[in-house]
Image (tube, grey):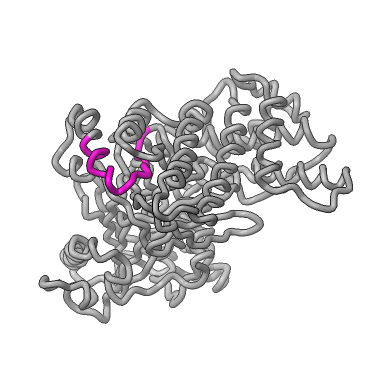
């Protein structure tokens, strides 16, 4: 999984066979539009996909493992560095950036000083996502080449097919492809996947979102045909995970709710607030369960204090005090933490800043400075009990799901019972997201209910929640029935365009991660491998 981002020689290296025809037309349109806008050909295209999360919702920023997979929808950046310097300010480089959806995302031109990239996180501007990738990439380039490194000017045309606010990580795809584009434009012949992922994780936070690391990891590391088990401690690691052969065969369906959930816009009361609540829960549990004066380790979580950090600290101290020579299994530890959380965090309506500060033995001002100043949040009370219960129980569900995948079904002639066990874990996740973490919405709940009645083994929200998409584990023979039920009971009641109707439900196959496609030595249309060419000419 580790190693350099691949350089694709054809679209067959990036997409599955069934997607080649559509993608070739799209890429050729991107390159033709680039030529029209800038009067010259692009040199390369940087590509990073969106993702769907199978299980492990809202636990990556608490540093627990997750199981996403990449999808076909992606962010493409066509790039050239052949930019005239005549109108560029001294000590600056120029960024020209446009979007194929120019009516919705207007083009911009920036003269950026060599020493800094200014991002106004209070302004919801689409180019901020490119700037955040630019900023992170330049920080890495300066570590490699020194502080005097001068970045190249760039001309960029972006085409994104990951729906914004759809829960499929459009922002992570855009930031990851932006960082990759900047690295390649500035002469990096090989871009390390781990370095790209780590800088993309940190970079997206510059836009004002307390992101974890799942989205970026799935976007960069994924391999076609496999899901991705991503762990964050002691360091970022990802490994491919295959689903066993089942009968009935399993299919993942992604269904749009068409409720837009923008993490930037609603962050203060939704996404960012949950991140703060999880870190506050870690600090609170540390104060009431560990010896006085115990400090949690500073880690890679958004606020440097995580529930995983508390988890490790608590059991390390328990083992030390008891003289235990053998550690409990992680599953047993998580079960114990669920019980301890229910006992120690007993205020179901939440905790005020004053109540939390008193337990942490700090002032309210100190609490705000440490936990609520980096990203804006709005709350009178913080639901520490519910957030910790979800995180610990969801981390446990991920381990149970992985255990089932690794065990393989015992009866290969009929795996219905095995399939149902996988699906039940997804259903439990949805119940927890709805009732405990409070990140679902009635539309997602309705899609899940309809799907389950029509034959889905397991249905749940995917992504940040509060709208967006849902993911469903469906037997292949029930796909038609589930789609028809959604159309009859949900989509027919919405005023949707033909384009929206077509994109409402997608049969998802695990896709490949980030890639670079060099076009400067391939004049004309993009290259498609002969075996996938069929009768069409690309």
Question: Which is nearer the eye, 382 or 322?
Answer: 322
- Residue 389 falls in image quadrant: top right
Q: Is residue 131 visible?
A: no
Residue 9: percent from left, percent from top: 31, 77
Q: Residue furthest bottom?
A: 521
Residue lying at 34% horizontally and 41% vertically, measured from the top left: 166
Image quadrant containing the C terminus: bottom left
* Foreground of the two, 263 or 455: 455
Residue 350, compared with residue 71, is above or below; it is above
Residue plotted at (59% across, 18% down): 349
Whether residue 411 sits left or right of residue 78 in the image: it is right
At x 50%, y 47%, the residue is 205
Q: Which residues are magenta?
A: 467-484
Q: Is residue 118 above or below residue 526?
A: above
Q: Is residue 392 above or below residue 10?
A: above
Coordinates of residue 80 in the picture (x, y in percent):
30, 70
Q: Is residue 497 visible?
A: yes
């Amino acid at each position: 999984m580790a190693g350099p981002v691949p350089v694709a020689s054809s679209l067959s290296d990036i997409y599955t066979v069934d997607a080649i025809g559509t993608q070739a037309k799209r890429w050729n349109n991107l390159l033709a539009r680039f030529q029209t806008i800038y009067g010259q050909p692009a040199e390369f295209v940087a590509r990073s996909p969106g993702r769907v999360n199978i299980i492990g919702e809202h636990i990556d920023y608490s540093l627990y493992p997750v199981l996403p997979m990449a999808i076909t929808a992606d962010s493409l950046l066509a790039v050239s560095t052949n930019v005239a310097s005549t109108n560029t300010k001294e000590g600056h480089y120029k960024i020209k950036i446009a979007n194929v959806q120019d009516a919705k995302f207007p083009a911009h031109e920036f003269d950026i000083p060599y020493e800094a990239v200014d991002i106004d996180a209070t302004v919801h501007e689409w180019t901020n996502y490119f700037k955040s990738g630019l900023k992170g990439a330049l920080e890495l380039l300066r570590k490699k080449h020194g502080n005097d490194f001068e970045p190249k000017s760039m001309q960029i045309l972006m085409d994104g097919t990951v729906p914004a606010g759809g829960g499929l990580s459009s922002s992570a795809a855009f930031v990851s492809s932006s960082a990759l584009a900047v690295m390649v434009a500035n002469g990096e012949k090989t871009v390390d996947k781990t370095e790209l992922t780590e800088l993309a994780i940190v970079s997206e936070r510059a836009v004002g979102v307390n992101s974890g690391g799942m989205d970026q990891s799935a976007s960069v590391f994924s391999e076609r045909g496999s899901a991705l088990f991503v762990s964050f401690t002691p360091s970022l690691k990802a490994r491919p995970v295959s689903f066993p052969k089942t009968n009935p065969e399993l299919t993942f369906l992604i269904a749009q709710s068409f409720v837009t959930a923008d993490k930037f816009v609603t962050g203060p009361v939704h996404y960012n607030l949950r991140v703060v609540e999880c870190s506050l829960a870690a600090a609170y549990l540390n104060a009431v369960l560990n010896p006085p004066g115990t400090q949690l380790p500073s880690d890679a979580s958004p606020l440097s204090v995580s529930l995983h950090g508390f988890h490790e600290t608590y059991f390390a101290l328990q083992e030390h005090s008891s003289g235990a020579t053998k550690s409990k299994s992680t599953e047993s530890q998580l079960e114990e933490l669920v019980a301890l959380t229910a006992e120690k965090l007993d205020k179901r309506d939440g905790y005020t800043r004053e109540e939390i500060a008193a337990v942490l033995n700090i002032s309210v001002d100190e609490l705000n400075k440490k936990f609520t100043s980096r990203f804006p949040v709005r709350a009178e009370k913080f639901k520490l009990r519910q957030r910790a219960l979800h995180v610990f129980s969801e981390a446990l569900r991920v381990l149970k799901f992985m255990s089932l995948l690794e065990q393989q079904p015992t009866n290969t002639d009929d795996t219905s019972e095995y399939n149902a066990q996988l699906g039940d874990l997804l259903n439990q996740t949805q119940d927890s997201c709805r009732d405990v973490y409070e990140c679902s919405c009635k539309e997602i709940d309705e899609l899940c209910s309809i799907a389950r009645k029509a034959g889905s083994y397991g249905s749940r929200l995917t992504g940040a929640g509060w709208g967006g998409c849902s993911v469903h584990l469906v037997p292949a023979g029930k796909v038609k029935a589930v789609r028809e039920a959604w159309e009859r009971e949900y989509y027919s009641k919405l005023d949707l365009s033909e384009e929206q109707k077509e994109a409402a439900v997608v049969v998802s196959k695990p896709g490949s991660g980030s890639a670079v496609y060099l076009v400067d030595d391939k004049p004309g249309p993009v290259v498609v491998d002969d075996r996938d060419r069929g009768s069409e000419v690309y």
